[in-house]
Image (spheres, rainbow, N blue to C red):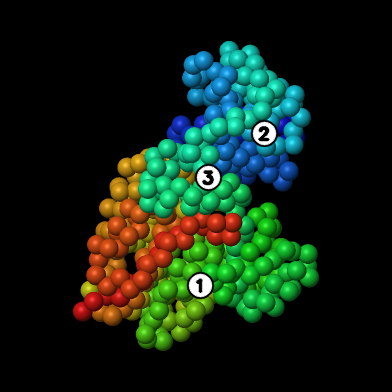
Amino acid sequence: MNNPVNIRMFALNILYAVLIQKHKAKASIEHIISEQNWEPRDAALLREMVYGVLRYYYALEADVSRFIKQKPEDHSRIALLLGAYQLRHMRIPDHAAVSETVAAIKPYVSQDAGFINAVLRKVSDSEPPKKLKPHQRAELPKWMYTSWREAFGADTVQDMMQACKQPADLCLAVFKHRTAWIEQAVAQGFEATEGELSPYAVLLDAKTNVAKLPGYAEGEFIVIDQAAQAATLGVCVSEEKGHILDLCAAPGGKTALLAKRFPKANVTAIELNPKRIPRLQENLKRLDIENVEMMQADATHLPYKDNSVDAMMLDAPCTASGTLRRHPDAKFLHDKESPEQVAVLQKELLTEALRVLKPSGSLVYAVCSIHPQENEAVVNAFHGVQSTQRLFPSLTHDGFFFAQIIKQG
């Protein structure tokens, strides 16, 4: 597959699915790549265009809107953003970026081809707008920017969103001696450094082929962001052979970390979605982990008696607002009501988790969101909160919130 026009057509289709139909970008991209059986170069170009437009959406919108008198049809509007991204951020000749984007729109809105050509040529001949509104400069929806500015301050928001404009590093939890593993990886030509949030964390380039890293087949590591590792490290078990639940467990990074930290404990990984379980099982098999039991179950109705489990990890469903480095589509999949709506489920999950936890047992509540409605507003409704920590997105880790709770009574 070497036709760049077709790649832009697919990029346009995926961006429409994300921005208009609220579909997740990663699943759409991977489905098309596997279906088309593309070369790595073409797959990389598709990812670059889709994620690039999503990362720089608001600046691109300000850029092209200067040359438009009225809002165009959705496909055409997205094509303008796609063309502008190529002109501003990619090493593609301007004439090629314009002509190939114009060709890509024709199957969707053929009558707008001339209009798109004219606007993109004006973008090509101009400098980017120097003045952007604060939410545009932060690359955030206005409601999200306003909420975070009030909660954290404008400077913090701009700093963390500057980091989110960069693709996320690959992060591993390495279960053998970390320094020795890094030395081995470096000797094989990989650039690897220690993460600061976890004694297991190793950072590598985002484009690293995981299967070619040393120790992959031997199960020496698993992919998991170091912020998620830090949250998981908060789980503690008083009984060496205690029973630990990992709720909402897929894809299995936290399950693996729990199993490796507490090799004599009985870990039960609970996942509601049956489609996510095979990947979890595959990861645990590669890691040669034998102290984990899989269970498909609804974590709001756990099949356990009251006060029966020693410790628990609850990585609750959330708006994923802390993962914008990795998933820039997350800011388009929710609206200002979403954090409070999701918090209802989070409180329900936490209530059920505490029901089955033994008195004095340890529970970690974690979400990869930094919305206060999904953070303190959730855990402060419960007794026994020992500590809380919010990690803002940075160049080396996702945004995360986690709290350690000890059950009272």
In the rendered structure, find residue 88 and report the number of the disc placed on it.
2
In the rendered structure, find residue 257 and report the number of the disc placed on it.
1
The number of numbered discs placed on residues in the rendered structure image is 3
Mark 1 to mark 3 CA distance (whole Å): 27 Å
* Element under disc 1: helix
Pinpoint residue 53: horizontal percent, then vertical percent.
58, 36
In the rendered structure, find residue 228 and report the number of the disc placed on it.
none
Q: Is residue 390 above or below residue 49?
A: below
Marks 2,1: beta carbons within 8 A: no
* Residue for point 39% across, 42% down: 146
* Residue for point 46% across, 84% down: 264
Mark 2 to mark 1 CA distance (whole Å): 42 Å
Q: Which marked residue is nearer to the observer: mark 2 or mark 1?
A: 2
Inspect this view and state whether residue 243 appears. Answer: yes
Where on the picture, by quarter, is residue 83?
top right
Amino acid identity at mark 3: Pro
* Residue for point 62% across, 57% down: 169
- Mark 1 or mark 3, earlier in chain: 1
Amino acid identity at mark 1: Leu
Marks 1,3: beta carbons within 8 A: no
Q: Is residue 68 above or below residue 134?
A: above
Closer to the camera, 405 or 256?
405
Mark 2 neighbour density, 10 Å: few (under 14) some (14–19) many (20 or more): some
In the rendered image, which residue does mark 3 sit on? 328
Q: Which marked residue is nearer to the observer: mark 1 or mark 3?
A: 3
